Each structure stands twice: as C-alpha cells, then as structure tokens.
C-alpha cells in the first residue's frame, strides 16, 4: 500500500471564489468518471480502438507500441511507489529533453497518482531552486546529462524536500530509473485517482520573474483533448507527430505526447534538438504528418521545404509566439500547407483560439475553439464593440488555478480567464492578436520575464542600473534588449556587451540573455523610483 495522500497541492489552491468557471456543456464527447487516471484513460482508449500494437513512442533507438509503453509506464510507477516510497499527491520533478525516456517518466509519475512537474533542460540551479522552494517535490527523475544543475539546486536549503533523485538515460548506472524499472513486474495495487486530483504542475515565469505554478487535473487534460485536437487539429491514428517544443512546455506536452495518445497516433522523439534543415529531413525520414514548432522555425525551414519537399506532412501548427502573416505566407508558398495558428496559455493547458484549412483568415489567429467561449473586453470586463482592441477573456473546460499565488486575482475575474493579451475581434468572430498587455517578452517561442534578466545583469560588477524590454525582431518576433547604466570606470563597448551577455548566460537559462544591449547615462523612472518600461520602448523605437 502506498503512503497517505499528500494534500500539499490541494491545500494551496486558490479559494473557490477565485477559481474560473469550468464549462463542459459544449464538449458532448467528454465522459470522465469521478475516479479516473489520465494515463490509464488514454491508454484504455487506444486499446479499445484496436491500437494496442500500433507504435506510440518512437526514437532513433527503439519503438514502443501502446501496449508495450503501458508495461514500461507501470514499471516506472512501481519504482516510485515501492522503491522510493512516494505517496499519491507528491510532486515529482522531471528534467530532460524530448526523449522517449522523458515521456515514459512523465507518464509513470501521473500513473502513480503523483503530480508531474516537468522543467526546461536549460534551467540553471538558481531557477531550479525557485521551483524547489515553491513546489517542494519529494523526488526528481533527471536525464543523466542534466544532473549537475539539479544537484547544485538540491544542495541549497530550498532543496531539503528532495529526498530522492533517480537518473534516466544512464545505461551504466545500476540504480538508474531504467535499471530499477526492469526489475519490476508492472503489476501493483495502484492508487485510485479522482478526476479532480491534480496531475501536473507547469511553471511559467511572470513579468516579475517570480515563477508561477499553474496546475491541471486529470479531468482538465482529458477535457482539453476533446476540444482543439478533435475539432481543429483533427488528429488521426495514422498520424506521425514531430516537433521542437519541449515536453516541459504545455504546448509541447500536449502536441508531442498527450494529444497523439488521445488520437492513437505515434510520436517521434529524437533525443536531440533540431536544426531547420534536420527537421525538414525528419519529415521524410519518419513519414511525419503533423509538425509542431514556433514561427521562427517555420521561417527558417521554408528554404529547405522548398528544396527538399515535405513528404507526407499534412498539418503544421504554430504557437508559442505571435505568427507574422509574412511567415505564414512564406511557409505556405514553400510547403503548400496552410498553417494552423493558435493561442493558448500554460494556465489554460493548451490552445483555445485557432482555425485550420478553409477556416483560416489572413492576419487572424482564428476563431474560438469549440468547447470554449472568448470575448474582447474593457478594463471593467464589458465586451467591447467588434473591431475594437481590448483584453482577451476566455472561459471553457480548462482554466487557471495557481499554486498559492496572489496573481490568481489578476488572471481570473468573475469566472473568466484573462491570459494577458490584447486582441481585436471582427464581425465574423475571428480574433486578431495585437500585443501582450504585460511585460512578458516572447522570443522565438520562449517566455522571458524582463525583471529576471535585470536581476542577473545587476549582479555583474560593472552594472549600476538596467532595464530590460522586448524589442521587435523580424526573425524571432522579439529579442531581449537591455538598457544598462555602467559604473564609473567601465566602457560601454563591444567587449562589455559580450561580457554582460556571457554573464547572463552563465547565471540563468541561456535563451534569456540580452541579444541587444544599449548603454545609457540614466534610466527613466517615476518620482518614486519606479522604472518606466514604456519609455524604454519609446527609446528603442528611436
């Protein structure tokens, strides 16, 4: 028998009056029993449809069918319950790239009734420390190649909760996750999970740089499967899915694991990152039919798609940042495919505005996804006239619940979710993205909080003050740009630019470093000393 249920997460959810409304009436295909496990539900669905022997997870080293994958997932769950003595409701941190082993580990955690907490491979010890402090995971499953930063974070006082760390992708380690799992039967008295038990926690950095921890239940994820993948993506059992978003992002988790499982499809997990050329070649090598990646990558892939063709590819999905129409048209000209654009949020689990095929309208992200309702509102929550710019508000079968965070009040108002985006809706119901209405920088699909970069820069001995914004960029959508005031005796030259960039790369995730640095004598501030970011943006525009 496993230990008693850990109530850490339920006890730290927002008060009920701060929850969003969860609406299920527009998802007639959704049937979720009160006692259900997300992983079992997806695998049972595949088995009922006759997909037990069809490929589910594929890598350069091996292929697992749905039935084989279930056996390995069960063994991993056994390791967590029996060897590590973990309890349902415990948080388990996962650290790894897009590998078959990472996917199995994530599924094993959720199968065992625990809360899967996947983290980006590029995170440094300081950032991992913030996550450890907030989530207090009892164990971690970590790719052997990424152990160093995790162990450094674990050595800090905030790592006290982390009792066990098991490595995977570690063939020489007799105590690795794989070695332990190989000794298990795959048969156990499994914890009974309820539909509203939390299955995953997905950290996202807000504009303050302090990590936020949205959580989603087994019911949330199963409901999401009945919305966008059914009605817009229309995933099929003979699809082969490829893409670049990390499994630690909900964009990647949904697109490259959960939704293919729901559809009985297979996923190609390369184990290493893609270049634009290698991803196009992968279309041919594995018979890919669906691709997920960010707009920047599609722009870079276009010449190779034109040169090499796209094989059997039938759907390409863009999300993670705004999709410029020029990129959409470039990809269409090169591939012959109309891009599926979409906007989602970690807080909502996945995409809630999107259109495909003949429903696509130039310049628009799309219409609200069946199962959701969306509107553009003013500051008081009143819907504005069509054609007017306002704030996007969304309601549906998923919604935002932060773990113990005052920002819940900002995200959820009167039951509606406010993702923090400015939109315009036309008379036909199409939504046109305008901008973020906060200070989040979205660069090549990654979210970067300006204050976090400022904090890293201020730790360099030459920096007196700094302010960080997102600057428009044709290739990446936005780039991180820093305005720095140097201390006396330091020169604002090319050598200093490189020194500051290297310093940031060494202290936080490398993708967050400022690609542009401008040296200034003073920063614009209010009388109370508050940095005026809007004036930095004006300075950037010249």
Image (cartoon, rainbow, N blue to C red):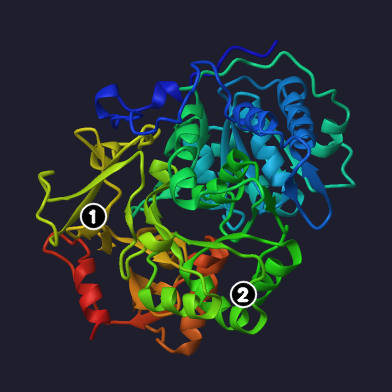
Q: Position of residue 85 (x, y in %)?
A: 71, 20
Residue drawn 63% across the image and 33% down it? 162
Q: State the CA–CA distance, disc 2 to disc 1.
A: 34 Å
Q: Could one spot residue 486 in this view of the protein?
A: no
Which quadrant holds the C terminus?
A: bottom left
Front of the two marks 2 and 1: 1
Q: Quadrant of residue 307?
A: bottom right
Determine which quarter of the picture holds residue 141. top right
Q: Position of residue 482 (x, y in %)?
A: 37, 74
Q: In the depicted view, which residue is nearer to us: 92 or 102?
A: 102
Q: Residues within 10 Å of mark 1 (few under 14, many from 20)?
A: some
Provide the residue designation for mark 2: 276
Q: On residue 526, which mark appears? A: none
Q: Residues within 10 Å of mark 2 (few under 14, many from 20)?
A: some
**Placement of 137 over or under 429, stated as above or below:** above
Percent x, y for residue 359? Answer: 36, 60
Disc 1 marks which residue? 429
């Amino acid at each position: 028998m496993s230990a008693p249920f850990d109530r850490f997460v339920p006890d730290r959810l927002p008060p009920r009056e701060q929850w969003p409304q969860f609406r299920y009436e527009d998802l007639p295909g959704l049937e979720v029993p009160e006692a259900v496990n997300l992983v079992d539900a997806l695998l049972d669905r595949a088995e009922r449809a006759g997909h037990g022997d069809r490929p589910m997870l594929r890598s350069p080293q091996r292929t697992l069918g749905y039935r084989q994958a279930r056996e390995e997932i069960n063994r991993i769950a056994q390791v967590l319950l029996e060897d590590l003595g973990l309890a349902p409701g415990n948080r388990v941190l996962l650290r790894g790239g897009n590998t078959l082993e990472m996917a199995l580990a994530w599924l094993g955690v959720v199968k065992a009734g625990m809360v899967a907490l996947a983290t980006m491979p590029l995170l440094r010890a300081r950032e991992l420390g913030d996550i450890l402090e907030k989530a207090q995971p009892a164990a971690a499953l970590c790719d052997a190649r990424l152990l160093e930063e995790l162990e450094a974070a674990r050595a800090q006082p905030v790592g006290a909760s982390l009792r066990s760390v098991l490595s995977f992708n570690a063939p020489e380690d007799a105590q690795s996750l794989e070695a332990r799992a190989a000794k298990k039967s795959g048969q156990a008295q499994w914890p009974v999970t309820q539909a509203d038990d939390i299955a995953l926690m997905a950290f996202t950095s807000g504009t303050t740089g302090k990590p936020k921890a949205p959580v989603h239940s087994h019911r949330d994820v199963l409901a999401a499967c009945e919305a966008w993948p059914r009605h817009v993506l229309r995933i099929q059992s003979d699809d082969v899915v490829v893409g670049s978003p990390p499994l630690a992002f909900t964009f990647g988790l949904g697109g490259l694991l959960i939704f293919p499982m729901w559809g009985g499809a297979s996923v190609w997990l390369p184990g290493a990152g893609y270049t634009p050329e290698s991803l196009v070649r992968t279309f041919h090598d594995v018979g890919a039919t669906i691709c997920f990646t960010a707009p920047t990558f599609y722009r870079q892939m276009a010449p190779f798609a034109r040169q090499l063709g796209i094989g059997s590819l039938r759907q390409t999905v863009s999300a993670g940042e705004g999709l410029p129409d020029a990129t959409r048209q470039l990809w269409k000209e090169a591939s012959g495919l109309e891009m599926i654009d979409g906007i989602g949020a970690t807080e909502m689990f996945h995409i809630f505005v999107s259109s495909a095929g003949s429903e696509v309208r130039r310049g628009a992200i799309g219409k609200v996804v069946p199962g959701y309702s969306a509107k553009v509102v003013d500051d008081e929550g009143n819907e504005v006239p069509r054609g007017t710019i306002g704030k996007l508000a969304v309601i549906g079968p998923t919604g935002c619940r932060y773990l113990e965070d005052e920002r819940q009040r900002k995200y959820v108002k009167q039951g509606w979710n406010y993702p923090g985006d400015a939109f315009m809706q036309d008379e036909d119901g199409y939504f046109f993205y305008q901008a973020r209405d906060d200070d989040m920088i979205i660069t090549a699909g990654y979210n970067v909080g300006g204050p976090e970069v400022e904090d890293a820069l201020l730790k360099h001995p030459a920096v007196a003050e700094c302010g960080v914004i997102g600057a428009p960029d044709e290739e990446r959508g936005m780039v991180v740009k820093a305005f720095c005031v140097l201390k006396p005796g330091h020169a604002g030259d090319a050598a200093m630019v490189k020194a500051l960039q290297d310093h940031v790369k060494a202290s936080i995730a490398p993708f967050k470093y400022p690609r542009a640095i401008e040296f200034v004598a003073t920063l614009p501030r209010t009388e109370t000393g508050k940095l005026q970011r809007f004036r930095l943006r004006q300075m950037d525009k010249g």
